[in-house]
Amino acid sequence: VQLVESGGGSVHSGGSLRLTCVASGYTSSRYCVAWFRRRPGKELEGVASVSDDGVTKYGYSMKGRFTVSQTVSQDNAKNTLYLQMDGLKPEDTAMYYCAASSPPAAPICTTIEADFNDWGQGTQVTVSA
């Protein structure tokens, strides 16, 4: 699966951003796609995932300010994953990555790094105080 992220940038605390990830090249009708982030000096964190049938899952403490969604092309060959981020805080500053697994590595989509095979290049989000 090929993944291309966009939408990162710099905002002030309390601001909003919407990240976009265009995913293509699925080898199965079943998939999981997800957002991860790596904050400076921290380990990779799972933000949220969504399955091919629209079931979402959020990482620890991610639900509330972050909302994941997707649109799917009519032929299911491509989908676009979104991450709406509201009420951003300086501690949300990170490189945000889109990831996919097709077919899924587990019966339900997770936010576990090891469950995803394909990764985008990332998009930087910087939140200033």
Image (tube, rainbow, N blue to C red):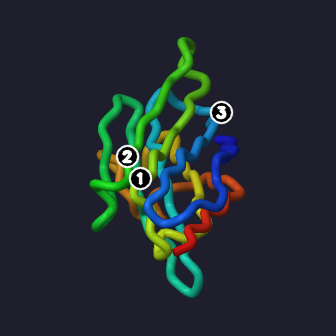
As drawn, the label of residue 24 is 3
Q: Amino acid at mark 1?
A: Asp
Q: In this view, which residue lies farthest toward the bottom? A: 41
Taking 3 as reference, is 113 left or right? Answer: left
- Which residue is denoted by mark 2 in the rendering? 67
The residue that disc 1 covers is: 86
Q: CA distance from mark 2 to mark 1?
A: 9 Å
At a point 56% along the width and 52% down the height, the residue shown is 99
Question: How crowded is the residue under tag 3: few (<14 C-alpha within 10 Å), some, or many (20+)?
Answer: some
Q: Earlier in the sequence, mark 2 or mark 3?
A: 3
Disc 1 secondary structure class: loop
Q: Quadrant of the N terminus?
A: top right
Question: Which residue is rendered at x = 53% and y = 45% of the image?
Answer: 18
Q: Secondary structure at mark 3?
A: strand
User: Tag 1: Cα neighbours inside 10 Å, few (<14), some, or many (≥20)?
Assistant: some
Q: Residues within 10 Å of mark 2 (few under 14, many from 20)?
A: some
* Amino acid on which disc 3 is placed: Ser
Percent coordinates x, y for residue 21 in the rendering: 60, 42
In percent of width and height, residue 38 lies at 55, 72
**Mark found first going from the N terminus, 1 or 3:** 3
| Numbered disc in front, either 2 or 1 | 1
- Are dots 2 and 1 in contact, CB under 8 Å? yes
Viewer-nearest residue: 44 or 69:
69
* Residue at point 45%, 52% (across, down): 85
Identify residue type, mark 2.
Thr
